[in-house]
Amino acid sequence: MKRLAVLISGGGSNLQSIIDSSKDGILKNIAEVAVVISSNPDAFGLQRAKTANIKNFSLDCKKMQREEYDKQMLDILKECKADLICMAGYMKKLPDIIVSEYKKKILNIHPALLPKFGGKGMYGHFVHEAVVKAKEKKSGATVHFADENYDTGEIIIQESVNIEENDTADIVAAKVLKIEHKIYPEAIKKVIENHK
Ligand code: GRF
């Protein structure tokens, strides 16, 4: 059973999808969420962790020095014996010490078809607004290995969704979020099975 550390900053709907999948979905008996770490003490995702009786920590990135934040995160990851790190709506760049310690063991989900609509500043609603502005016919979600940059790294799974002519950014966001919830557990399973 592989142990997952899920990093969040907000609502945690992707975290919930991973939790549900580990309990009675495609991740059952394959992976479990061992710990949830939030960069935001008010993240609703922490509530989801508590409800699921999952160990959880919030490292308030606004109040902590960067070095202290990074060290505490690394200590938690080691103590919880995390096999994979899953960034799920996590809004900070990972420190180099963690990227190098967990090479090819860090996954991130991005709400677009990378490499399009990725990079610094391209997150959450900004992505969907840019996709609508560009009159794209498709959007989707990408799970990729995370490295020290934003949204680069080898793609693991990508799935697209059609955009209708009058779709607003909110409608695109909702369509893409459904894809995210589907492909993140699939990506985790694929990485675990490839590492065997
Ligand atoms: C999602 O759009 C995800 O793609 C992005 O953060 C948003 C919120 O995710 N990374 P969640 O509901 O906190 O999982």
Image: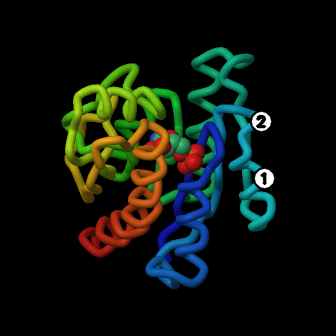
Q: Which mark is residue 42?
A: 2
Depicted 62 relative to depicted 33: above or below? above
SS class of the residue under badge 2? loop
Q: Which mark is residue 185?
A: none
Give the mark nearest the N terminus, 2 or 1: 2
Q: Is residue 144 visible?
A: no
Residue of label 1: 47
Is 171 left or right of 15, judged from the image as shown? left
Horizontal and vertical percent position of residue 120: 36, 21
What residue do we see at 37% from left, 26% from top?
Answer: 122
- Disc 2 marks a residue whose amino acid type is Asp
- Disc 1 marks a residue whose amino acid type is Gln
Q: Quadrant of residue 168?
A: top left
SS class of the residue under badge 1? helix
Depicted 124 relative to depicted 86: above or below? above
Between 146 and 115, the residue placed more toward the observer is 115
Is 121 left or right of 44, judged from the image as shown? left
Q: Tell me the quadrant of the picture where the C terminus can be found.
A: bottom left
Is 21 left or right of 65, judged from the image as shown? left
